[in-house]
Image (cartoon, helix red, strand yellow):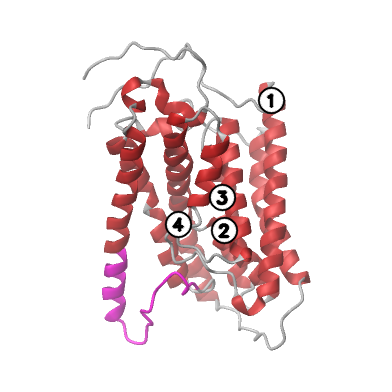
Amino acid sequence: MTTDSRRPVLSTPFHRMPTLREPWSAWAKPLLSVFAAVASYVIMASALLVGVVLLLALVPGVNIALGVTSGDPASPLDVGLALAMGALWLPAGMIGVRVGGWRPVGTAVSIAARVRRMKASDPAVLAVALGGPAVVAVAAIAGALAPVEAGAPAAPGPSFGTLLALLLVTLVLAPLQVVGLELTMRGLVMQALGTWLRTPVIPILAVAAVVLIGRELSPAVLIPAVTLAACAGVLAWKSGGIELPVLLTLTVTVVGILTAALTAGTGIGSGTSAMVAAAAAPGSSNAALADGTHASAALAGGVAGAIALVAVTAVACVLINRQERLALAQPVVRAADEPLPPLVAV
């Protein structure tokens, strides 16, 4: 293994981490990183879908017509498949950073090149931890207050066994999906663009657009999805890592899925499902869970949830500024005199 004694001249924000070492910021490395992640995801997702379809074909009475519009918020099978598809972004992102970028995975996690410990006493952490459930609550209330279309059927609630299975599936797979999504979108794609661009604005907006892949492009889903992705990008840049974005997206995902399942077929469920669809990973079958029978409720929930996301992000950024004594447009950065992460050999 060779060594590289080069030190960055200036302190480094999160989206510029590949520029710490010259081999990581070569012109082709961002393209190779993204290609390796996407290619590995497509291979793994195809294998998963084929395996699931073949398995379900052996089970009598199970509908195997799976697709991006088949999500049922009260079905452990549909939600589990969606979360499993999203969880594949974790190994895909790791492959993209490690194999495509030839750098430690930790450099895509934070400016410390590792997962930083979050303290419950940290005001920004507390704001995000409480903000995620608050976003879902706002979306649910907005959906409940929206006018209900005539003839919208009332669906029966799920059984206790179904709820228990849904809870277990969500608690096991949701963290994997969220970590994989943030590692790939904020830690890989945003940093790939940050290799070329000093400004964080374009990388944040570009990644927000990427999450629309495989989603239902209705306003009820599009508005909160873009907003959540943009807010996660801002938090990653401002805080210097993906820890706060993971916390925000995870709370929205878990609370949203469980709330949508309990209130499926109602305006509350439709408003909440818009946030579930917003938090879904690109390419997952959970990307279109906004209930079409309550379109106005879904739209109201999506818009209200998006506004709440912006508010939570703004509060977290203000708290980070106060704690770290930063200016409005100044992020937490890696100091220029910190030791560089090691070179890795593939």
Residue 282, numbered label? 4
- Rendered view: 46 above or below 59: above
Looking at the rendered structure, the kind of residue marked 4 is Pro
Label 2: element kind: helix
Marks 1 and 3 sit apart, C-alpha to C-alpha, by 23 Å
Which x, y percent locates residue 26?
33, 27
Q: Disc 2 marks which residue?
A: 278
Q: Are marks 1 and 3 in contact (CB under 8 Å)?
A: no
Q: Disc 3 marks which residue?
A: 249
Is 59 one of the magenta-colored residues? yes
Mark 1 or 4, closer to the camera: 4
For marks 2 and 3, the one nearer the N-term is: 3
Which x, y percent locates residue 236?
55, 36
- Rendered view: 180 above or below 319: below
Q: Where, by quadrant of the figure, is residue 276 drawn?
A: bottom right
Marks 4 and 3 sit apart, C-alpha to C-alpha, by 14 Å
Is residue 331 at least partly visible in the picture?
yes
For marks 4 and 3, the one nearer the N-term is: 3
Mark 2 or 3, closer to the camera: 2
Q: Which residues are magenta?
A: 48-71
Q: Residue at x 46, y 46 (%)?
A: 179
For marks 1 and 4, the one nearer the N-term is: 4
Looking at the rendered structure, the kind of residue marked 3 is Thr
Q: Disc 1 marks which residue?
A: 323
Marks 2 and 3 sit apart, C-alpha to C-alpha, by 10 Å
Marks 2 and 4 sit apart, C-alpha to C-alpha, by 10 Å
Q: Residue at x 44, y 60 (%)?
A: 83
Marks 2 and 1 sit apart, C-alpha to C-alpha, by 30 Å
Looking at the rendered structure, the kind of residue marked 1 is Gln
Category of crowding for the residue at label 1, using alpha-carbon neighbours closer than 10 angstroms: few (below 14), some (14–19), many (at least 20): few
Which x, y percent locates residue 75?
49, 74
User: On the rendered image, what quadrant is the N terminus found in?
Assistant: top left
